Image: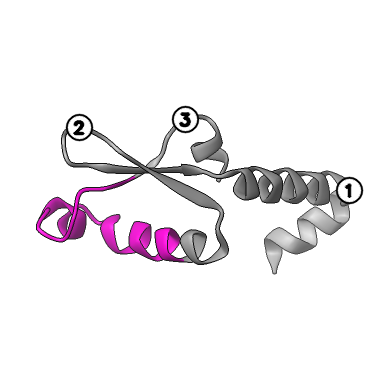
Amino acid sequence: MRRMYLGYPILEAGPLAMTTWLDGYGAEAALWLGYFRRHGWIAAQDWPNGVRAWFLSERGLAMLAAGEDWWRSLSRMQRLVYWLG
């Protein structure tokens, strides 16, 4: 979500794009895309070249802000326990 906030959308080239599955990130990106879409955190924008770009929606921006606030509220020890767990 942080990368999407910085302007790097998830790109969807369609089911016929072989690189979607062969680049090593396609399956993971598809999982994230489905998860974010189910929660309403992203919105699509169709580009003229046939690619669909998914950017954070208003709900996604709010979720990102809430997550960042939660992370900042943790102590250093709590963050360490989180990362080790």
Disc assigned to residue 73:
1
Residue where numbered disc 2 is placed: 48
* Residue depicted at 47% across the width and 30% down the height: 7
For badge 3, the amino acid type reads Gly
Q: Which residues are magenta?
A: 11-34
* Relative to 20, 81 lies left or right: right
Determine crowd level at label 2: few under 14, some 14-19, many 20+ residues with C-alpha closer than 10 A: few
Residue 38 x, y percent position in the rendering: 50, 67
Q: Which mark sits nearer the N-terminus, 1 or 2?
A: 2
Residue 43 versus residue 28: which sits nearer the camera?
Answer: 43
Q: Position of residue 77 (x, y in %)?
A: 87, 55
- Above or below for 83 versus 73: below
- Residue annotated with mark 3: 7
Residue in view at x 12 percent, y 53 percent: 17
Q: Position of residue 45 (x, y in %)?
A: 36, 40
Instruction: Point out which mark residue 40 bears.
Output: none
Q: Are marks 3 and 1 in contact (CB under 8 Å)?
A: no
Q: Is residue 53 left or right of residue 42?
A: left
- Name the residue: 86% across, 48% down: 76
Looking at the rendered structure, the kind of residue marked 2 is Pro
